Image (spheres, helix red, strand yellow):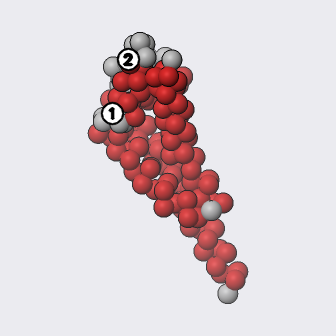
Amino acid sequence: MLYNSLADLIVVLHSLFVLFVMLGGFLVLWKSSVAWCHIPAVFWAASIEFFGWICPLTPLENMLREKGGAAGYDTGFVEHYIVPILYPASLTRQVQINFGIIVLSINIGLYFFVLHSLRKTERKQE
């Protein structure tokens, strides 16, 4: 029971990380220092998608599930939890690359907006 609960906690943390990567740019609008954590997180997540790596949290979750008597899964977190929600078909390499492009595009757009807002604020203060 403890191992399955820890595995569930890993899934929650993993989900929060994915949300932070996708939407953390909005937090940067509120507090610009968040960018110091968000930018590396975006590059990490995009790298995982572009290179087809498995996030280290996935094997950790699988290990905890197996120790708890449940079956682990052979795919990564995105393929196991996110893709079934977004796509009925299995994940292809092209879809995975598209995820990376989407992550980078959303965040580049948000950061351009943040920089534009900061410059606008600085001009008003002068």
Query: Residue placed at 58% from the left, 64% from the top?
Result: 32
* The label number, if any, that marks residue 12 in the structure image: none
| 25 left or right, relative to 103 | right
Instruction: Point out the image quarter for the C terminus.
Output: bottom right
Residue 72 appears in view: no
Q: Nearer the viewer, residue 125 or 39?
A: 39
Q: Residue at x 58, y 46 (%)?
A: 23
Residue indicated by mark 2: 66
Q: Amino acid at mark 2?
A: Glu
Q: Image height check: is 72 above or below 22? A: above
Residue at position x 67%, y 75% in the image? 121
Q: Amino acid at mark 1?
A: Ile
Compared with 75, 25 (above or below) is: below
The image shows residue 115 at horizontal and vertical percentages of 56, 67
Q: Earlier in the sequence, mark 1 or mark 2?
A: 1
Where does the image place residue 43, in percent across and percent down from the top left? 39, 50
Q: Residues within 10 Å of mark 2 (few under 14, many from 20)?
A: some
Q: Are marks 1 and 2 in contact (CB under 8 Å)?
A: no
Residue 11 position within the rendered picture, expressed as x and y whole percent measured from the top left: 50, 29
